[in-house]
């Protein structure tokens, strides 16, 4: 029943945090933490919590608990909790029958499942954050190093105007920073609602207290459980109000989209006819089964694969959330699990791939220079129209006139400059200068027409330092 990732290359890197084994361990941890939380608020003896902790640390697994059997048994109850609780209680009962009665007391299956998913997600997201932080640092270095490296800006696949490679990296950086902040803002609440979201089961644990004190006591137990797991206290019962799941899914999907933009740009710029960047190499990576000369940009391919797949996983979470009914759902809740888990797995994998890509990205500034020359003065035609129009015989027709001059010269900058000199005939410019060959050549310099690219790079780098 094991999914090794044959059809999702690279996911083996992250499976240990999100696979069935990891989730089963989270379920067991959630149940043990619940007993500890009961001990913290005085509902059960500390000895019960100690026994349960000892059992789940070893004897439970030695005694025969394995993920394959629990997965098969989950079909009968629609989720793995019923069979798992049988294993846990039996293992604890073999040591202390009283402690076994403290397991799962006051909870329902959805409380444990949702809380375990939050625990799994928190661990996965922590790893994602670490990799995103490394990506941000790598992009920051690239943006700073190439702050003034001139290159072609492309719009709708065509050469447009001059820019800098530093600005391209700054855009990547800004986008990933947005995603990183969304991930950092996530909360991972425990789920306590009981059989039908009324907290009746947990409230009954405090039957010896006055009715007026029970709600506060339940909150205290909720807080203790969250603290034991390193999660957040739930603000309300969320059995059918799936905000925590939707926020989680949206944040990690945003990360995939941001990394996908980087990968898409790399895939374009790494084409041999462009050749401005190359992926880092590694033994065996990117090879072709038929063409030995090829070095495929596999890291970017796999990141793009993830960016294309994760929106559907996020859509499934929203579709399920809109289909929740009553106080406990039928089917919609179950539809969340695999989508959320795969979304976390794919995001973690993409973040690892992106880290390797950005830390080792090779930049070819000579190729950038060659590509600038391909469009010659055409790249600065916007500037030429604005600057030279007053020196033309008919300023109102400046765009058409200059476009014709550039088309005539094709890729020969010298001939374009000469033609523009002939068209302006040394007439004065608004700044008092003369439209001679030296002035026009300077206007044709792509490095002199990058707008506020340098300032935009600095703005992104400043934002990075504030992270």
Image: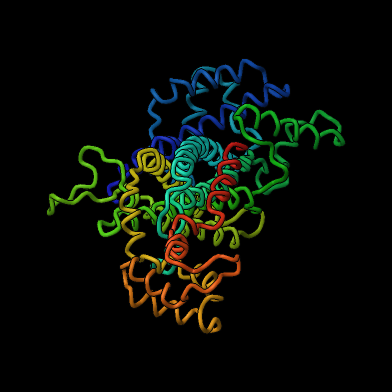
Q: Of 44 and 403, which appears nearest the observer? A: 403
Write down the quadrant of residue 64 in the picture. top left
Q: Is residue 233 above or below residue 175?
A: above
Q: From this viewpoint, is residue 120 visible?
A: no
Image quadrant containing the N terminus = top left
Residue visible at 35% across and 48% down?
365
Q: Position of residue 66 (x, y in %)?
A: 38, 33
In the rendered image, the vertical position of residue 352 relative to residue 209, given as above or below: below
Quick one: quadrant of the C terminus?
A: top right
In the visual, does 377 lie left or right of 137? left
Vertical order, 284 against 438 (above or below): above
Please report the residue visible at 66 percent of the width from the left and 40 percent of the height from the top.
Answer: 192
Percent x, y of residue 391: 53, 75
83 relative to 211 in the view: left or right:
left
Considering depth in this image, is 258 or 197 the residue closer to the camera? 258
Q: Is residue 35 left or right of residue 253?
A: right
Q: How many marks?
A: 0
Q: How is the image coloured?
A: rainbow
Name the residue located 56 percent from the left edge and 32 percent from the top edge. 30
Query: Which residue is more in the foreground, 100 or 47?
Result: 47
Residue 149 on image: x %, y %? 42, 48
Closer to the camera in the image, 3 or 99: 3
Q: What residue appears at the point 59 percent right and 55 percent down from the top-left corner?
A: 329
Q: Inspect this view and state whether residue 47 appears.
A: yes
Q: Residue 452 location in percent, x, y?
A: 56, 54
User: In the current view of this chain or complex, which residue is farthest to the top?
Assistant: 47
Tell whether 145 sits left or right of 323: left
Question: Picture quarter containing residue 401?
Answer: bottom left
């Amino acid at each position: 029943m094991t999914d090794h990732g044959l059809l999702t290359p690279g996911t083996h890197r992250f499976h240990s945090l999100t696979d069935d084994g990891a989730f089963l361990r989270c379920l067991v941890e959630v149940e043990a933490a619940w007993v500890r939380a009961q001990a913290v608020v005085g509902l059960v003896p500390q000895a019960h919590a100690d026994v349960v902790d000892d059992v789940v640390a070893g004897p439970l697994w030695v005694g025969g608990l394995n993920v394959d059997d629990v997965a098969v048994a989950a079909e009968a109850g629609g989720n793995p909790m019923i069979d798992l609780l049988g294993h846990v209680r039996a293992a604890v009962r073999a040591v202390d029958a009283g402690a076994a009665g403290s397991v799962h007391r006051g909870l329902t299956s959805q409380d444990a499942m949702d809380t375990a998913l939050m625990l799994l997600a928190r661990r996965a997201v922590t790893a994602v954050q670490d990799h995103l932080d490394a990506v941000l640092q790598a992009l920051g270095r690239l943006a700073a190093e190439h702050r003034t490296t001139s290159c072609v800006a492309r719009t709708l696949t065509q050469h447009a105007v001059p820019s800098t490679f530093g600005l391209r990296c700054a855009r990547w950086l800004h986008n990933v920073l947005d995603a990183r902040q969304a991930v950092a803002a996530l909360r991972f609440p425990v789920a306590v609602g009981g059989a039908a979201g009324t907290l009746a089961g947990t409230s009954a644990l405090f039957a010896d207290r006055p009715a007026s004190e029970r709600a506060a006591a339940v909150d205290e137990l909720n807080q203790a459980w969250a603290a034991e797991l390193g999660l957040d206290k739930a603000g309300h019962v969320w059995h059918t109000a799936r905000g925590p799941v939707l926020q989680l899914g949206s944040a990690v999907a945003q990360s995939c989209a941001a990394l996908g933009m980087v990968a898409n740009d790399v895939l374009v710029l790494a084409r041999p006819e462009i050749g401005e960047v190359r992926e880092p190499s590694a033994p065996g990576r990117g090879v072709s089964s038929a063409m030995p000369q090829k070095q495929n940009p596999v890291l970017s391919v796999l990141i793009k694969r993830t960016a294309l797949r994760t929106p559907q996983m996020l859509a499934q979470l929203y579709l399920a959330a809109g289909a929740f009914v009553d106080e406990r759902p039928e089917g919609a809740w179950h539809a969340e699990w695999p989508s959320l888990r795969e979304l976390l797995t794919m995001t973690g994998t993409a973040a690892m791939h992106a880290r390797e890509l950005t830390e080792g990205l090779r930049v070819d500034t000579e190729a950038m220079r060659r590509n600038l020359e391909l469009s010659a003065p055409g790249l600065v035609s916007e500037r030429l129209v604005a600057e030279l129009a007053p020196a033309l015989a008919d300023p109102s027709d400046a765009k058409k006139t200059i476009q014709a001059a550039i088309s005539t010269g094709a890729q020969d900058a010298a001939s374009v400059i000469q033609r523009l000199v002939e068209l302006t005939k040394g007439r004065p410019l608004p700044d008092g200068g003369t439209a001679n060959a030296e002035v026009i050549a300077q206007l044709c310099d792509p490095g002199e027409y990058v707008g506020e690219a340098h300032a935009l790079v600095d703005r992104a780098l400043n934002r990075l330092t504030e992270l």
